[in-house]
Amino acid sequence: MNGVRASASELRMLIEDMDSAADARMDIMVCPPATLVHEFSRLVKGSPVRIGGQDCHMSAFGAHTGDISADMLCDAGAGAVIVGHSERRANHGETDEMVRSKAEAAHRARLTAIICVGETLEEREVNRAEEVVSAQIDASVPGNATAANTVIAYEPVWAIGTGKSATADDIAAMHAMIRSRLKTRFGPDGDGMRVLYGGSVKPGNAAEILAIENVDGALVGGASLKAEDFLGIIKAAL
């Protein structure tokens, strides 16, 4: 819940200062609040940046005052939508079944579903991290997901804003498990499905994190609010 129309200045800086190599080497996406999706989608035309949404309802339309459907996001210019973000799960009580329904809605609207999974500190401390995340993948990811329409984002909830940090070994172990689970469920599509890391990625740690096996990109939080910081992460990935 950050950003107003004046935030477009940061997006313009991002586009203007982007390395031309980024266009061919990676996919870059900004997911602003729903109020900015349409305007931002116009601003990024002709650039390598794409626009996505932060959440969607599981229905295409109906009496759901205040909600945004995947079809509305698509109509506004989005190409993807985040579903099941840890803050949505924690603050709004979203279950795996709700997340799966939202991912299915995204697919129906021809949006890429960025499905978030991750364990809490309590779950990690009792050695249930992999069990929890594996169950989330089974229940949150639709059975017809493909490498073309689905991205997985691993968020170690216990390492976000707590002062605790996930080590390279922590990240490698979880991403390896996620990859194995995806391959078991989806075969070649599971092998090709991108798995992002979303635990306080910053310019200073991005290169190390992105070099870890099975880490295919980053779901960037606070560091995406300033073009300079986001560019630092993009450059670390080149």
Image (tube, rainbow, N blue to C red):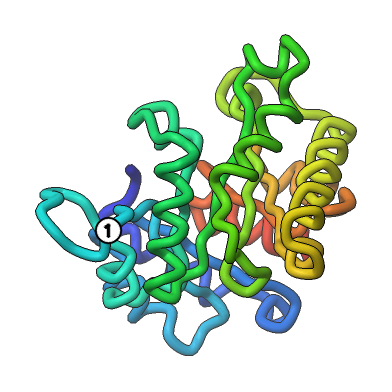
Nearer to the camera, 19 or 129: 129
The residue depicted at 52 percent of the width and 83 percent of the height is 47
Q: Is residue 44 left or right of residue 14?
A: left
The residue depicted at 51 percent of the width and 61 percent of the height is 113
Q: Quadrant of the N terminus?
A: top left
Residue 232 in picture, x, y percent from top left: 67, 56
The residue depicted at 60 percent of the width and 64 percent of the height is 145
Q: Is residue 80 left or right of residue 212?
A: left
Label total for image: 1
Residue identifier under label 1: 59
Q: Is residue 12 visible?
A: no
The residue depicted at 66 percent of the width and 53 percent of the height is 218
Nearer to the camera, 141 or 5: 141
Q: Quadrant of the rendered structure where residue 155 is?
A: top right
Q: Amino acid at mark 1?
A: Ser
Residue 223 in picture, x, y percent from top left: 56, 46
Q: Quadrant of the C terminus?
A: bottom right
Residue 77 in picture, x, y percent from top left: 34, 77
**Residue 146 in the image: above or below residue 116:** below
- Dot 1: what SS? loop
Residue 212 in picture, x, y percent from top left: 87, 49
